[in-house]
Image: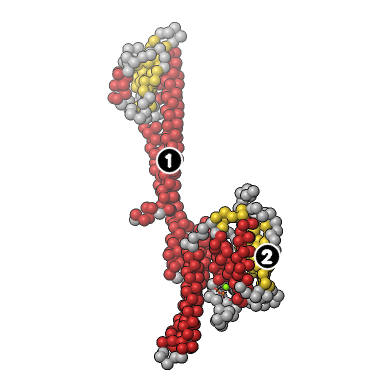
Amino acid sequence: MKRSRNSLPFRISLVFLLSTLLIEGVLFLLLYHTLLGERVVEEINRLESRAESHASVLAMNFSEETIDHVATMESETDTKVAITDPTHHLLQTSRFFPQVLADTVDSKKQTGPFDDTTVLEDDWENEPYLSVRTPITDDTDRRYGYVYMFLPTEIIHGISHRLQWRFLYITAIALVTTVLTFILLSRLISKPIQSLKQATENVLTNPDDLRLPTNRVDEIGELARAIESMSVELSRLRRERRQFLSDLSHEIKTPLTYLRGYAEIASKESTPESLRKQSIQTILDESRSLTELVENAFQLAQLDENTFLLHREEVTVTTFCADLRRMLDTMFRMTTVHFDAAPNAGQQDIALTLDRHRMLQVFRSIAHNAIEHSEASHVSLRSNVTDTHLILTITDNGKGIPEKDLPHIFDRLYRVEKSRSRQTGGSGLGLAIADQIVNRHGGELTVTSDASGTSFTIMLPLDKKTPIL
Ligand SMILES: Nc1ncnc2c1ncn2[C@@H]1O[C@H](COP(=O)(O)OP(=O)(O)OP(=O)(O)O)[C@@H](O)[C@H]1O
Ligand SMILES: [Mg+2]
């Protein structure tokens, strides 16, 4: 019950009911007072004019016959009449003249003015009769008496009752409409929201069995579509994570097998000294690459969780490019690969904000791949500055990456050479990490490759503020 009182349809219906009743109440009060007020004034005017016309007839001929005639005439109507002498003593009344009216005549005899038509009673709500009095006076101002006229207020009470009943009908109609609105709103809003809620709860446990009103064209449809795409994304992430974990455990198992095998060889008494040394060297190499793999996996997990801290600093394009060239020069000097870096193109003294250490790691990873996997004899670095970006391209003239592998090389643990040999074997995480780091900087890492070599392009956004001079 508490829940349905807090429900959206209930609240909307309540607002609907209250506003309907408020409008209806205001209209009723307006109508009630205007209509009844006007009716009372109208009835009193009629009463006055009838009293005056009787008075003028009686003034012309104030005889018993005329008095009887007036009284008989009024006996046919709702109104009552009383004709008195100048001292307010009753001379004649209409038929069925109640005692209460005789008492009224008596009680009002002191109430002036007497020379004009006077409204003696207009309180229709509390008194049984409206009453007026008019003097019977001829042209010479001779006073023959008075005409008292009475109108029962029950006619006006009748109108008032009818209005009150109508108000009750309308209230009942408003209540029924509210109940219908509540039912309709429940169908239109509450049920779909309930099912959305249910579906959202199921997203984690049963994402493939989502039944959502995605074809609705309203806000609920929009919400359903948003939940659906969120669930698709969630499923994809979960699938990827499952895949990554199973690939990773496979990757770890292989070096562990090597480690155990070589450790067994090294620990045997009978193993010749040279083989023992070689085994220990292999154990060292394998444990180093295992450590690297675990560190890389940890870095990726941090990148996924957004807990990978970037220590951003502001550097100029010139400084960063000089650092980069120095690092790559040192790396390639240890190899037979020839490296060249063209002078920077474009405006140089623009600032960019980045984690220098991490960004150099990206380039180290790409250069390392060129050395390890490309069989290239030459690698070059080109840089260019546009209005918004610093664009750096590393190109090798190696064997290239097969077209079918190209879309996957940023995937985790993906290697073109599936066999894991000591010369070419990496963890397959280098480019995945590089891609994430560039993304976290708001940049973009892309690759193009064919049989004549591979090019990696990194676009980094420049600071929007004024250049450092
Ligand atoms: N310049 C390149 N030329 C040819 N193949 C490349 C080049 N760069 C990358 N590759 C291919 O892409 C794969 C993925 O590279 P990535 O750096 O992600 O992994 P890895 O180098 O194998 O391992 P790690 O970098 O984690 O030690 C590599 O295994 C390699 O097959
Ligand atoms: Mg690599």
Secondary structure type for disc 1: helix
* Residue at numbered disc 2: 341
Q: What residue type is labelled 2?
A: Ala
Tell me where residue 154 appears, x and y as whole percent: 36, 32
What whole-number distance in Å separates the C-alpha atoms at marks 2 and 1?
81 Å
* Residue at numbered disc 1: 22
- Ligand 1 shown in quarter: bottom right
- What residue occupies the far bottom of the structure in this picture? 270
Secondary structure type for disc 2: strand
Camera-side residue of 196 and 291: 291
Q: What residue type is labelled 1?
A: Leu
Report the disc number at residue 6: none
Camera-side residue of 242 and 124: 242
Residue drawn at x 41%, y 8% is 142
In the rendered image, which quarter is residue 50 located in? top left
Camera-side residue of 429 and 119: 429
Residue drawn at x 63%, y 71% is 333
Tell me where residue 112 appears, x and y as whole percent: 36, 14
